[in-house]
Image (tube, rainbow, N blue to C red):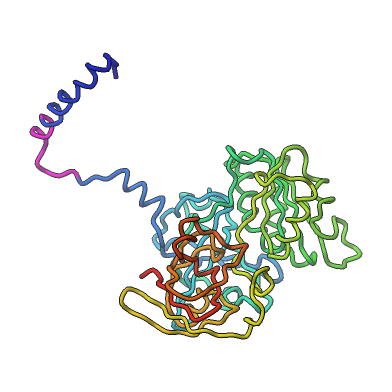
Amino acid sequence: MKVKGFLKDVSGASRVTKRRLAAFSSASPVPVTADPIGDVAREWHPGKIDLVVTQKRPASKTSVTLRFERPDGKKLPPFYAGQYIVLDFPIGDSLISRPYSISSAPFEARLDDHPFVEITVRRSKGDGFICDHINDNVKPGDTFRGQMGLGQFYYEPLRDAKHVVALAGGVGITPFASMAKEVAHGTLDMDLTILFGSVSSDDIALKEELEQLKSDRLRIVHVLSGDEPDWPGERGFLSAELIRKYAEGDCTFFICGPQVMYRFLHGELDKMGIPARRIRFEVFGQAKDITQFAGYPEGMADKTFELTVVRGIHEDRIPARATESIVVALERAGIRIETGCRSGECGFCRSKLLSGNVFICPENDGRRAADKDFGYIHACAAYPLSDCRVRIPIE
């Protein structure tokens, strides 16, 4: 567009208006129904979609990989390697949502023939009934509702170093498996070194799949913490000494694993003097034992309070244990609330605390400053300390 000068350009607005009116008067009376931009948006961000299990296979001695496809065979929504999917599980009278890191690669969701997405789930140690339900009961042909492409745990070249050192523990390998497959496919431009901590050599999740992907740009170092005299590789934990051995030059550190590993690695990376901008922690779900966090009041562990749940003009009164989040209390009572990360980050379960006191898990407090000022909570990270009244979103 030619610039003629301030006055001429400003006065030209009237000419533009006349042209628009002329175009309107000569336009067809038949409305234009095509919406190409909306069509792209709906394809890439469809919200919840139907998914059917098309394959279930062992990923290790104690874990399985589930493959999902769309019933109509269409491509799945795009996502970044490292993001997660949220699946809805009908359990009794409740519909419970759980997030799982995606272990397949983004390019596999966009294949022309049978596009798919996969998750890998390890059997729990007595504190994860959904994990056990997946391992024991879910089978090919089962259908679910899910939403994918969530979370901020992915490589960003404008922010992250070219060399990524992934520190994985147990089934925390899943987002790095997705990254590794994408690197091997040539659609993710970074160098990836995975330090993968496991307890025993016969229970390393996705070991065979990962070994087939090794290249000059992808190194996988297995580290065993269990007592196996014949183990030929690295031993112990992912300590600062071990990390220094494989972290060459400028690196970004991505960490995914159990909560105890997160706390350990905070200290080890601090010893190395790694700046915060070079460290990325994946969200790790709800706290296993909220009473162990600083600031949690003594004498609350055995208490149960009354939670008044407000949905529009409807109210329910349910019991809520002091050691369980408000989300868990709602699910136990069969009251549906949307959840995503279950780690206080995504805001899906953002609710208004109308009265009462709660303890907010300090490691999971992802609220905005304004929400803190005006009494909003993320229900997955809030634990009742008295009788409470909470207004939750209406589904």
Q: Give the x, y percent position of residue 343.
A: 56, 64
Q: Give the x, y percent position of residue 62.
A: 69, 71
**Along the line of sight, the residue nearer the viewer: 276 or 152:** 276
Residue 260 in magenta stretch: no
Report the quarter where the C terminus lies.
bottom left
Report the quarter where the N terminus lies.
top left
Residue 237 drawn above or below residue 245: below
Q: Which residue does the image show at 46% across and 63% down from the upper left? A: 348
Residue 386 drawn above or below residue 260: below
Residue 180 drawn above or below residue 261: above
Please indicate whether residue 77 sits to the left or right of residue 156 in the image.
left
Which of the 4 quarters of the picture holds residue 301?
bottom right
Residue 100 drawn above or below residue 24: below
**Along the line of sight, the residue nearer the viewer: 314 or 195:** 314
Q: Give the x, y percent position of residue 387.
A: 49, 81
Query: In this picture, which residue range is highlighted in magenta?
Result: 22-32
Residue 23 in magenta stretch: yes
Q: Give the x, y percent position of residue 388.
A: 47, 78
Q: Which residue does the image show at 39% across and 60% down from the upper left? A: 72
